[in-house]
Image (cartoon, grey):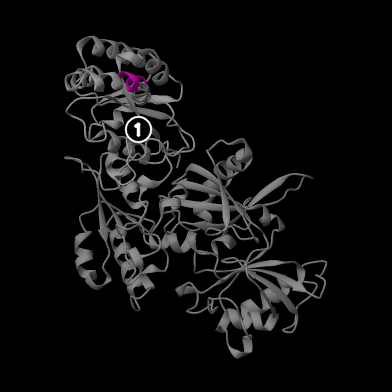
Amino acid sequence: HSRHRLRDELWLVSPLVFARSCFLVPAWASRLHATMGRTDIIPGTDIPEGLVGTLYPADSPANKLSKQLAEGKIIYVIEVRGGDDKNEFGHRPEVIPTANKIIEAGMNAVPLFYSWGNDESFRTTVLDPKVVGVVCITGAVLPSFSKDQLDKVIDDLKSAGKLVAEGTDIYSAGVPKRFNTLMEQPGTYKYKCAVIQFKVPGAPNGGSDKGADGNRVDSIPIANGIIKAGARCDLLLYDYQKHDEFVASVQDYDALLVRINPGQLSQGTGEGVQERFDNTMNDLLAKGKLVWSSPSVQTQMGAKDALVKIKDMSCGLPDTFAYYEAKELEEGFKKSMAFQPRVIKQNRGSAGEGIWLVWLQNKPYCKNFGDAYLSDNDQLKLMEMNDNHVEYHTVGEFIEFCVNGPTAKAGAWKSTFPGKYLEGGKEAGGQLVDQRLLPRISEGEVRMLMVGDVLQMIIHKKPESGLSAVGGMSAYTYYRPGAPEYAELEKKFLGQDLPQLKKSLDIEGEPLPLLWTSDFIPADGAEPGSTEYVVGEFNCSCVGISKFQAVCGGGKTMGGGPHED
């Protein structure tokens, strides 16, 4: 119609102009037809260069299509060329923003023009197996016969199992709905819950575990999960300077989920803040409220000496020792280190700091445990797991560093953390755990992500350099429960060890943490070529959801993560 109208208008101007237009029409018509049913905007590509500045202008973000994903399902946003409901770029104003929302949600979105002239190619395009659905933003410019044809195609789409949405309702077209804010609370509810968070004074976003909105990246999804289950769930911020107000505010909640990283309550807050917070949680527990994880569970299960309590279970190592005083450390370490390489783990910290792999230098190991006892002058090679750096010290220097820090007696240390691992004694969390070094740690750790007693995910963390799989120094591979690679470990841990775990850790009167992990290290089994797995640590204080870590902190939100995650 536009072409005919243009021809008529040109005819009125002059015969010469009309004659020139006859030669121009074929090229112009070809370009118009190409934009009516474009299929050259494909996943993994930028916008075709010829369209930038016309259909998708480079200087107008609201009208520029986002870069497509490398792979993935496609949703077509269908519109019709022409009409007074279009902007200067030929689109209804909502088309490109709608497509970009789909792309942001982790799927590919391509605007597609429908015309009676390209009916068959249109049908072939939208019925492709990669197409999940379509969003129809056609407006009211289609003539009746053309609309009937489009309706037939839509019926074919529905018959083929494709999803069809009208207007800008992208979720009806198969886009998974995401939330970066708290969902609406239920009108009626049986339980009232809260997710408790804390902002470290002076830290960007309130801490490295936070996003730009000041929330942990997993707090809103956890709260929304509770809301979807039918309970109320609020987000509460603990202000240590208004402790009494906080205590009053949590009294009418049935359950609290504490999402505060270990050590954060002691960063820039002064003394006693952690203790006051823990006392509040214990008071609520005494009143019959639920707290995940309770201070006692964090202490009994999250402390490194939990490894001593499970040493006689199938997932433990029998030669695991705990040291709470300097004398215990000196006597125990000099004996164990003479026998074989060791791992010495401090109780505090959550990123590998104060966890040392230790090898004896310039001296053979003894044949049997207890046959030899090292001196202060024996030489050690040490690797700290937070960054894989290596240091060389004497036995005496290492013990001094562990007890008193980098004193003159301890020599010069490269570690950015000050030692003093026994400071405060057992009651304050001062302790060291001594385990044999399993050489197959270089193959990585196997993490079981648990919700209560239910396995949610298995994560293999393979070190990219050195022997540490913490932080960003590892490659992650994710497995669902039942994966054949770890079927035997899953069966053994869930069926044999888990029922004994609460008794071994002295938490029989407490629920298991709502979200926790058990990290396993591979070891050679009794049978040649077999593998057994040993627990290297439990994490239960404020476990992060592994798939969310890619969008943790900075200005990123859940909307920016890959759909698969």
152 vs 400, nearest the viewer: 152
The image shows residue 202, relative to residue 137, as above or below, that is: below
Residue 289 lies, with reference to residue 137, above or below; the image says below
Q: Is 23 included in the stretch rendered in magenta?
A: yes
Element marked by disc 1:
loop
Q: Name the residue under label 1.
A: 175
Q: Over which residues does the magenta segment extend?
A: 22-26
What's under tag 1, amino acid-wise? Val
- The percent coordinates of residue 408 (x first, y second) are 60, 90
The stretch drawn in magenta includes residue 58:
no
Between residues 187 and 303, which one lies in front from this camera angle? 187
What's the residue at 35%, 14% (across, down)? 119
Position of residue 291 relative to residue 375, above or below, is above
Q: Where is residue 106 in the image (x, y as percent from the top left)?
A: 40, 38
In the displayed structure, 283 sits above or below 551; it is below
In the picture, measured across the screen, residue 122 lies left or right of residue 300, that is: left
